[in-house]
Image: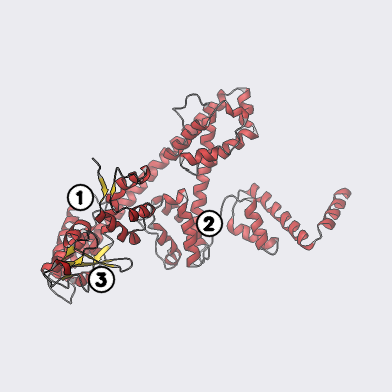
Amino acid sequence: MATTILTPAENRFLQLSQPALQLPDLTRVMPLLRDHPTIKDSSEFLSRSARQLLVDQRVAWLVQGSEAWKLLARLPYAINDSDHRTDWRHCALCHKPVRYEYHVVLRTDGHEIVVGSECVKKFMSDEMQYLMAITTEDNFHAVAQYDDLTAHYPQVPEILWDDQALPHLPQSHQHRQRWVQKGTKSTVTGYLKHRSPTLPEQQLSPYLTEYQVLQDVDQAAATSQAEQQEKAAAASERVAEQEAAAAWAAANQAQSTAEQRLRASTDYRGYLKAVATLIVQHLPLAAFKEHLGELTMPRSLQRLVNSYQLGVMATEFARTGQIQATRLQIVPRYLVADLNQVSRQLAAQRQRDWNDDVFNAAVGFDLTPAERQSRLAQLHDSWEGQRIPAAVYPELATLREKLTQGAALPAGWPQALRTAISKRLDRQPETGWVPARKNHVTPKQLRRLVDRQPDFAAAAQAYHRLYALPAEDEAVTLSALQRYTLLVADQRAQRQQATDNLVAQLLKQK
């Protein structure tokens, strides 16, 4: 017997809620929802991936949708005067005629709909159902009073309705949290049941004061936990690096002369780097293999490893951040160790580059709000960017302004991001903002410096502002940059041949 995955009422609710949710997966299946009111697991139009997505995400979408709506303060409900059902308005969700109309509005854009009491109970949040009961039974103006109350005390909804509030609160403090919740709800309910122009400031004060104390305790516990996790991760990474180094050393010792020649060859090192570059992009396996097929594998490697084995290694790296390939017994250990070493180096460099780019987009560069938003959006699309909650990016867009005003980094950010930005903030001058400097530079980036600057002095100044290479590499880079700048100047002035002739004469006389 076919099972209904999504009923027509649930479908309409998700369609109406979608503008406020902006969930990529929901947006992707929205055309399907618009074309098919009822979706069953046996529906022929339903692809396997869409079916799995709906099964996995349906409940989460409905819950998030329930929080996107609120009762309309100026007209929370109305009762139709007619006794004839044909005169009644229809519920926007179940399409049944309803005499008791509840007017709800989308928080983001103010879109209003009429919903029946049963659909309010089925689809809307606990907060709305709580207000619905008080509005209907006690005080028509309860919603307006609640809006006024929460505008003055925005922590009240969090205390009453957020089950995930204070997630790190120690067990010993949880009885105080229950006391705050119970006292706050009792106070708010008493206030809402009677029309009142005065907020219950005095009655709420002890609970809100205690809640602030609990928030501080929760934050301290979260910071402590994050530090412990960071230490554990660092210790695990050191162990992994030691194991990788040991494997690499063992492979070096055990290898034959032929293996030494292979590992030292340009083809071998180049192919390893190309494969590692694909691995650290964390592509889907099919895409990884497609790009892998575009690479030319050196003949000396073709008898040692194949695309299936490289796919297993890519999957392992995506899952654990390292390659051990214990399942692949026939792959040479030195090849596994080499690919692991190169992949980890490239992944670390990508993460550092991403951290630099995020800092520069949020703080280091002088950008317009639109430019800042655009750069942060591009960084969010990368694999590294998707490890960060989407809610962080709007805060990054205003971070420079807040830091200028003396604010601290938001405590709710992932610890790794806080640490990365803190390190770069520590290198800032006492006044003004400067970019985080990259530890490597490409020829394309150097050419861009020359194209944008009038002479070598300006190009060098721009280079030092954006890059900081090891001393030996920097000396070579600046020398090449100066030569290239002079060469470009000669080409623009059409004096290249004369310059070449004079240089040739100078070298002859030497």
Query: Helix, strand or loop at disc 2?
Result: loop
Kindly state the secondary structure of the residue where label 3 is placed.
helix
Numbered tag placed on residue 73 in the rendering: none
What is the three-letter code of the residue carrying label 3? His
The reply to whether residue 410 is in sight is yes
Relative to 359, residue 5 above or below: above
Q: Secondary structure at mark 1?
A: helix
- Name the residue furthest bottom: 197
In the drawing, does residue 164 fall left or right of residue 460? left
Q: Nearer the viewer, mark 2 or mark 3?
A: 3
The quadrant in which the N terminus is found is top left
- Left or right relative to 462: residue 405: left
Verify CB contact (< 8 Å) between mark 1 and mark 2: no
Q: Which mark is residue 152?
A: 3
**Which residue shows up at 41% across the image and 61% down it?**
394
Instruction: Name the residue rendered at 50%, 40% in the picture.
Output: 288
Q: CA distance from mark 1 to mark 3?
A: 30 Å
**Badge 2: residue crowd in 10 Å (few <14, some 14–19, many ≥20):** many
Q: CA distance from mark 1 to mark 2?
A: 43 Å
Residue tagged by mark 1?
172
Q: Which is more foreground, mark 1 or mark 3?
A: 3
What's the residue type where badge 1 is placed? Ser
Viewer-nearest residue: 84 or 336: 84
The one nearer the camera, 388 or 45, is 45
Q: CA distance from mark 2 to mark 3?
A: 40 Å
Counting residues from the start of the chain, the first of labels 1 and 2 encountered is 1
Q: Which residue is mark 2?
A: 436
Question: Front-most of 229 and 158?
Answer: 158
On the image, the x and y values in percent for residue 507 come to 85, 49
